[in-house]
Amino acid sequence: MKIVIAQFKHETNTFSPVPTPLERFGGGAPPPEGPAVLEAYRGTGSAIAAFIELAERAGAVIETPIAASAAPSAPCDDSVFDYVSGRICEAVARGCDAVLLDLHGAMVTASHDDGEGELLRRIRAVAPGIMIGVALDMHTNLSATMVENASVIAGYQTYPHIDMHETGLRAGRPILASLQGCPLPTMVWGSRPMLTHVMRQGSDDEPNRSLQARARELEAEGMLGATVFVGFPHADIPIVALTAVAVDHDPARARAACDELLDMAWQRREGFVYQLEPLEQSLARASELADTAPGSGPIVLLDHFDNCASGGTMDTTTVLGAILAAGLREVAAFAIYDPQAVLAMRQAGVGARVTLSLGGKLPMPSIGRGGEPLQVTGEVVTLVDGRFRNRGPMGRGQQVNMGASGVLRVGGVDIVVISEHVEPHDIAALEAVGIDPARYRFLMLKSRVHWRAGLRQYARAVVECAGTGVCTSDYASLVYRKLRRPIYPLDAVPGA
Ligand SMILES: [Zn+2]
């Protein structure tokens, strides 16, 4: 028995100006191939690690052609997509009994709005009838092409995504069972015309909390798979929607479960709409909370318009600039992406005072904004190589590279500056630059929901700060040309 196991993950923000070269899929280097995949992922909290475990336990021969995973950014070049897809298809063409894929589900390429659908179609073209198990992110924009060309699909049931490994098990187990003689289950899916707001998608918040709980309950009652995908709204493509997929040996039961989940989401659609607060008001509220909120630890200031794990440039300075202008002190800010600034800090050395044009290097034509760097003068207090291993619970054990990094102290603000895009969701990221959140009154994070995974425990309170960026929380400001219409809440939808 031979199983091909691969990973190809990219969440594409079609509004993002951040390029997506092959090196982005390996954290600043070409992605691992062959045995290096096993070395990189075995034993980690990822779906691909779960596939490896399942296959090894079954005594299967494993081929791991490639494991490519990039932080979200602009559409993938055709050459990159063809290369990674080609490595996977070549491995499948050499002969195998099943394919297990760790994908994202929201990849857009220069030529394909539905990257995963195209990949799966190519695999099926090479090996018609081959069994394919797929693990997907909750932010998948699911399509008919994906469902038709896969055998079993399972998606994360948590956001922050702390069940990647479990999702791999849910996608892989029915495939392994079929290899051992069980019949292959049926898979059905459906969608509702909803553009859910990322800031309202957390699985600790209603209505997604109840939706995910119901999906888990269906599985506990014996269904082979039940997944609700909230979708990824920063993609101007026709397949964006809230979708669900159900896997079972009984097609009628699968259909009923899928429809139940979709109806539940549609009935509670208002809960997925986000209300913005003006930045000045947010910072004033944060200052008040710092004096009055019970407990200990910093007030988290969430710069949610510029999250690199949603395709943000991670170098916009609106929120940081407002923090400095407001004179807030005892602040740590994670992080501004600016390799040039880090280079200047390294040339100056620890202890030196430098004046920098910080951030704002990438123009954002999709939202009509140029780069807006911030002129700052401060002391270089830390310089590191920026490599660390996630402690979890999200991406536990995975090696992360934020590149050469440092801390610049400007007035009362310790600004972390990094050279590779990394969303702060793990305490190890802060520790890597010597930041102990307990020592600060405020902690600015460029994140939306994932920070909760490993950092919420340090926060006394959280204030969401509306800044600038291509993962803007003001969806009315995005110009959608290809999105399905009508879609809630942008349009009046019949039946809504
Ligand atoms: Zn996601």
Image: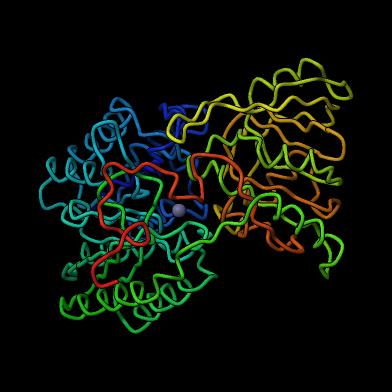
Residue located at (51% from left, 51% from top): 473
In this view, the residue in front, 220 or 364, is: 364
Which residue ends up furthest to the top in the rendered image?
347
Q: Quadrant of residue 438?
A: bottom right
Q: Where 425 sits versus 258, above or below?
A: above
Q: From the viewer's perspective, is 379 left or right of 179?
A: right
Which residue ends up furthest to the right in the rendered image?
351
Q: From the viewer's perspective, is 150 left or right of 323?
A: left
Q: From the viewer's perspective, is 67 left or right of 456?
A: left
In this view, the residue in front, 27 or 230, is: 230
Q: Where 332 sits versus 241, above or below?
A: above
- The x and y percentages for residue 402 are 62, 34
- The x and y percentages for residue 298 are 79, 56
Residue located at (85% from left, 67% from top): 292
In this view, the residue in front, 300 or 396, is: 300
Residue located at (35% from left, 41% from top): 64
- The x and y percentages for residue 492 are 30, 63
Colour approach in the figure? rainbow
Q: Where 44 sits versus 289, above or below?
A: above
Q: From the viewer's perspective, is 214 left or right of 359?
A: left
Q: Quadrant of the C terminus?
A: bottom left
Tally of numbered tags: 0
- The x and y percentages for residue 32 are 43, 33
Q: Quadrant of residue 38?
A: top left
